[in-house]
Image (cartoon, rainbow, N blue to C red):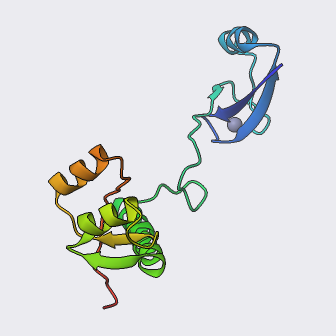
Amino acid sequence: MIKYELKCRECEHQFEGWFADSAAYDEQSAAGELLCPVCAGADVGKAIMAPNIAVRREGATPSRAQMAAELRRMLMAVRRQVEENCDYVGDAFAEEARRIHAGEAEERGIFGEATADEADDLREEGIEVVAIPWLPRSDA
Ligand SMILES: [Zn+2]
């Protein structure tokens, strides 16, 4: 058995229909045997399904502004998380990362500025580095 979400194109009613398989659905659909339980209309087809990702209200697609706000909220959370749990080492980031890697400095999370070249060098040396999109504080 297979279940389809069906939609009446005449009255917009959505309902579920069970079929032996997808071929059975196609047959009944082609034969006009699928009837809307509300208005008895025969113009019934599969409802379009969409994955339920980041949709806050039923049937409402987030606008660009909402998505930008959501992204910003997430990045601010990352920033807060890093600031609370890591030491800021500024320009000395690459140097400090090497010292920690070599066991010369206390092992801890650090963050700071590094050039792309420095970051590449660190990665080649086997030191894990991630670049974080850093947003200016809006509440500063
Ligand atoms: Zn209908």
Quarter of the image that includes the C terminus: bottom left
Q: Is residue 62 left or right of residue 129?
A: right
Q: Is residue 131 above or below residue 104?
A: above
Q: Is residue 122 left or right of residue 126?
A: left
Q: Is residue 25 above or below residue 87?
A: above
- Residue at screen point 31% across, 84% down: 138
Q: Residue 94 sits in which quadrant?
A: bottom left
- Residue at screen point 80% across, 35% down: 37
- Residue at screen point 53% across, 56% down: 54
Q: Residue 70 sits in which quadrant?
A: bottom left
Q: Is residue 97 above or below residue 18?
A: below
Q: Is residue 71 left or right of residue 31?
A: left
- Residue at screen point 44% across, 70% down: 109
Residue 39, visible in the rendered structure: no
Q: Is residue 121 left or right of residue 86?
A: left
Q: Nearer the viewer, residue 96 or 3?
A: 96
Q: Nearer the viewer, residue 128 or 55?
A: 128
Indicate the position of residue 105 as horizontal and vertical percent values.
39, 72
Indicate the position of residue 137 as horizontal and vertical percent values.
31, 83
